[in-house]
Image: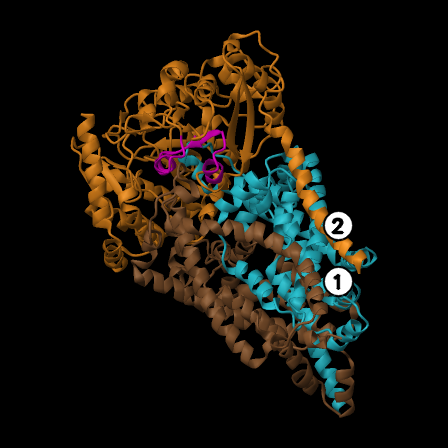
Chain colours: A cyan, B brown, C orange
Amino acid sequence: MANQENRMLIVVFYACISLFALICLIPFVMAVSGSFSTEARLAAEGYSFLPRGFSLDTYAFMFGSKAEQILQAYLTSAIVTVLGTASAVLVTTAYAYVITVKGFRYRNFFAFMAYFTMLFSGGTLPWYILATKYYHLDNTLAGLFVPYLLNVFLMYLQANYFKSIPHEIIESAQIDGAGHIHIFFRIMLPLGQVGLVTISLFYALQFWNDFYLPLLLVSEERLYTIQYMMYNMMANIQYLASGNSAQIGGAIIAPPLETAKMAMTCLTVLPIAILYPFLQRYFVRGIIVGSVKG
Amino acid sequence: MSDEALQPGKAAGGSRRFKSLRNDSSLFLLALPGVIVLVLFAYLPMSGLILVFKNYNYNGGIFGSPWAGFENFEFFFSSMDNAIRATRNTVMLNVLYMLTGTFFSVAIAIVLNELRGKLFIKITQSVMFFPYFISWIVIGAILFSFLDFDKGVMNRLLEAVGMQPVDWYSNPWLFVVVLVLANIWKSAGYGAIIYYAVLQGIDPSYYEAARIDGASRIQLITRITLPLLIPSIILLTLLGIGGMLKGDLSMIMGVTFLNPLLLPTTDIIDVYVYRTAIRSGEFGFASAITLYQSVFGFLLVLIANKLAGWYDKESKLF
Amino acid sequence: MVKKRVWSALFLAALLLLSACGTGSNNGKESTSPANGTNNESAGSTLKPAKLKIVLYGDESNRMKELSKAEFKDLIKKEINADIEFQFLPWTEYGGGKTDLMLSTGEDFATYTDTNYMVKSVAKGLYTDLTPFMDNAAGDMKKSIDDNSFTAFQLDGKQYAVPVGNKPNSGEFYSVLARQDLLEEVGMTGISSLAELEAFYDKVHAKHPELIGYASTDARKMLMYEYTDKNLFWQNDMLAIDEAAKDDKVISWFESEDFKAYAAIMRGWYQKGIIPKYAATNLPQLQSDWNSGKAMFWAGTAARPFEGAASITQAVPTAKLANYFLSKDFPKISRGTYSTAWFVSANAADPERYVMFFNLLQKNQELYDLFAYGIKDKDYTLDENGRLTRNTTDALIPDWLLMNKNFMRFDNTVPDDFIAQYKAWDDDAIISKGAGFNFDNTPVKNEETKINGVFSELLAPIASGFLDYDTYFPKALEKLKAAGFDKYMAEYQKQFSAWYAAKS
């Protein structure tokens, strides 16, 4: 009796999840099909699951003669994502460990110090002055990820995962005379793997998706990331399409606005959305093994 | 051994031994990289907060520009009806987002946790995460082709079943539903991943014991899974409460295109500041209101944090 | 234990090193001595070397990249002994964003601006006063650009920005740019009144219900002759002046009877579908529709019939465009013939050299051709009539920016009579009596900001017909007054009167 009930429940569960996943997938399919549609038909008929008048015009427009730069930008994005995620995960987990150590007198001090920055920020101007005039991060690779090495939200998430590790394990290690650094690298990191997988995923996305740091700090094309290139392209297309350019005497150009939005989504989101789930395990293992060996 | 230092409560009062100090110093070392990042990129730039009380000019710079007192706040608070409406809309939408978002994230995580098909879980998990990547502009464009009055899919469906077409984009309260649904769609998968990861870390022996006692699946969920998720739910809620007054301008811009007819419910603080201060080029006004949002959120968090502390000391943010 | 600590220290050191490395690679850029200062046998050699940075908005094309490192660079070096660097920013950073950050941190650069952004920036001390350099450095420019364009960018008699471009732009948006092909298809020959315009819509709508009527939400200029006897010229969203009256009176547009009449027409258009329902939501879609040949008419300018034609004919090969004025009794009003204006950042080491560069852009036909079209016979060719054929679609220095009717070239699709019409467009125009007035909003910053809120929420949708005037205007007016409109208006009138009196 109970068994049958359980089986029913499982079927319902599978159905619910499948349905929600499907709903999440629909706009994606539309975006992909939209990117292969022609602008005129898309504007006239709206989105659908199959491209409206299959065409590669939008990609041709976006790539233009820029294929080489776009490849370079993918490479920069990949480097920034790998370097950024690896170092951010270490900085974050170390900090998260510190605020979870029971009995550490300054535990709350550090927690508060991090939390406060989630709410208060001094605005872009002082940040920009410091980053360019004092830290000299403009036009450097470091400038593309160092400012984001500690995401406080993810730090709290990691701390939450650490808290679920049974305290006895830490205690017994301490009885064996292990210091915090040993405990952190040898016990917490390997045991907190689930958390690590999660925050490394979020970090990878953060670094991959960021266009703000390049916008502020980069003027040399060799350091453009793919998101920044797309942001730049989109901003310009949108500006031309909005008619604002007419106000300052602009010419009328008809960029493929709608299809370009969709193509941009495909070019930036798809690589990481498809690749990351398969890479994450190796990536996280890499971080843990690397740090334990170190 | 210094078990004093390991047990909460005792350590605070008792004398600390040399060993625990040495232990502490290694903790400082672990925190150091994070502290450096925070100081360099958050605390030092915070000196700029004084700009909010100043009339910035180039020659004076951040510190030498003349004081303006609360002048930069005036445009917002001198017309109270706007300030109140904007604050109300922001809080209303955020509360709705938080309630529905948490509910769906937790539900999905729990359901996923019950399933065993590894490939199925992996695929659906990735797919549910997709929407999180898509910018609001793109979502807005796709949504528009659903909701457009003349050509939209929704109205064609309504007509097909013999109902009146709805002018979605001129109905502010109906649009709140659209926004809430859009938010669930975009962020539920993201939240579910966080909660699901917590559940994966749970020791399976908990369940076995209960199962031996003859608990049904539903009972396992309500008695074991859900309680284990509560600390995480509290954490995410606390983190969310700090941002209670911060709205997502890009969402409203992307999804409503700042349609004036929808402003009665979509005119959140960030939108109001955008349409007044930022469009007028008064960026000083805009940062003043950001400070208002932060201070307000901070007060809320202090209260919420206290409440969480009564429930469980370990749930507190700080 | 010790080993671990060493490891952490190493990790930290690595982090710091990363940033340090970055700094290292940056040093090259900061060296101030020009690397290739050897090219000295030219007119520019009497000047000491200088470095200029020009910020432009939009995408940098590949050809622009090549030229700015080769021919442009060499030529500028030769002419004014300056090393030039072009930096491209996304359009979102125009008039704010990164441009503001660069100005606030004292970077040495120049880019273009509009009068609004200029007034605000000058108040913050972000622009260099260029007055002292105008006589010496801007000689050629003064010949090819009219005086009114210069005065438009002066504040208290000081030249804070230098106009660029010189094109007929009087009567901007005062004409109906109609799809001539559709007009002919339904048996009409022209449009000379609102009634005819609506008849045009009705007839085409009956035949092609999929087309929208008007591809914009603002028709106050093109319809002016229908709802007022005045010759209105708008100073901003809120205020207008009457060019037909010889006085200094500023008119509150929304409070006027004229606005009421205009709002009624627009409400009719919205309800009838001449302006589609989605216009309230998806404004960019309107232009998208126009560009893909899905709209009947638009607001016209001198250049629009040929500027936008290419994209429409791509979608509808038979499309033709023509400008119609609903009435021709009033003279066309011009704000000045500039496209935009260059400013120089406050901290620039050598502002005069920047002005010399601006001058170079509009100096003569040869240089204009180079900067706008590239190298002759490589990037473009000219036929015997001087018509232009470009071999690349890559934009160089944007041609809308340079566009100067003395120098600009047309391609061979533009009919001769059209060019003649275009060049003569401004002949019967008068310059606005408010041209050159720039409002200093400092005393009413708060009011202006709040008024913008009322404008975007209520007044703009009433003006476009999305909201009914009779139902919503009383509330809008109440909010407008509460926002301090009277104070704002009084301040504007005060400044305008003072300026007007000083002018005449």
Q: Chain of mark 1?
A: A
- Residue C220 picture location, percent across and down: 30, 42
The image quadrant of residue C315 is top right
Q: Which residue is mark 2?
A: C10
Start-end of magenta stretch = C100-127
Q: Quadrant of the C terminus of chain C?
A: top left
Residue depicted at x 45% and y 15%: C363
Q: Nearer the viewer, residue A231 or C135?
A: C135
Q: The residue under label 1 is which amino acid type?
A: Ile
Magenta span includes B108: no
Q: The residue under label 2 is which amino acid type?
A: Leu
Q: Which residue is mark 1?
A: A181
- Residue A147 picture location, percent across and down: 61, 49
The image quadrant of residue C153 is top left
Q: In the image, A228: left or right of B125?
A: left
Q: Secondary structure at mark 2?
A: helix
Q: Are marks 1 and 2 in contact (CB under 8 Å)?
A: no
Q: Chain of mark 2?
A: C
Q: Residues within 10 Å of mark 2 (few under 14, many from 20)?
A: some
Q: Residues within 10 Å of mark 1 (few under 14, many from 20)?
A: many
- Residue A215 picture location, percent across and down: 57, 42
